[in-house]
Amino acid sequence: MSGAAKRLIPLFDRILIKKFEAVSKTKGGIVLPEKAQDKVLQGTVVAVGQGARLQDGSFAAPTIKVGDKVLLPEYGGTKVNVEDNAEYQIFRESDIIAKVE
């Protein structure tokens, strides 16, 4: 994790994710145009908030940990650009579809 991403700590039930790179070249070496590339719907968890706040003021521990590979929804999330030109997205824990083992 880069230094700028270490300083970006999500709050409550939000999760900071770095999406995987889109495949831009086939196994045979053919370069794919941007329109032909599939959307990337997987990523790696970079940082996790403390969890959702419950009625009594305590926090529910998140089920996702740093380093988990997750399946993301096609739409949603908030794009965040940090100073090292890396692009991250912030999702709520409830928006994440699944963990990938």
Image (cartoon, grey):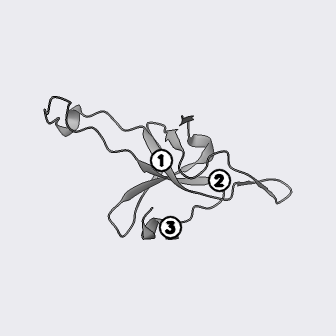
Which comes sooner in the sequence, label 2 or label 3?
3
**How busy is the neighbourhood of tag 2: few (under 14 within 10 Å), some, or many (20 plus)?**
some
Which residue in the structure is indicated by mark 1? 44
Residue sitting farthest toward the top: 28
Which comes sooner in the sequence, label 1 or label 2?
2
Residue at 20 percent of width and 30 percent of height? 27
Where residue 87 sits: x, y (%)?
Answer: 37, 57
Residue 52 horizontal side relative to residue 36, left or right = right
- Under mark 2, the amino acid is Asp
- Mark-to-mark CA distance, 3 and 1: 14 Å
Q: Could you tell me which quadrant the N terminus lies in?
A: bottom left
Q: Quadrant of residue 22?
A: top left
Q: Nearer the viewer, residue 93 or 22?
A: 22
**How busy is the neighbourhood of tag 1: few (under 14 within 10 Å), some, or many (20 plus)?**
many
Residue at 37 percent of width and 38 percent of height? 40
Which residue in the structure is indicated by mark 2? 13
Q: Which mark is residue 6?
A: 3
Q: Which mark is residue 68?
A: none
Q: Are marks 1 and 2 in contact (CB under 8 Å)?
A: no
Q: Could you tell me which quadrant the C terminus lies in?
A: top right
In this rendering, the answer to whether 34 lies above or below 48 is above
Secondary structure beneath dot 1 equals strand
Q: Nearer the viewer, mark 1 or mark 2?
A: 1
Where residue 95 sits: x, y (%)?
Answer: 57, 41
Residue at 62 percent of width and 61 percent of height? 11
- Under mark 3, the amino acid is Lys
Q: Nearer the viewer, residue 78 or 16?
A: 16
Where residue 52 sits: x, y (%)?
Answer: 71, 53
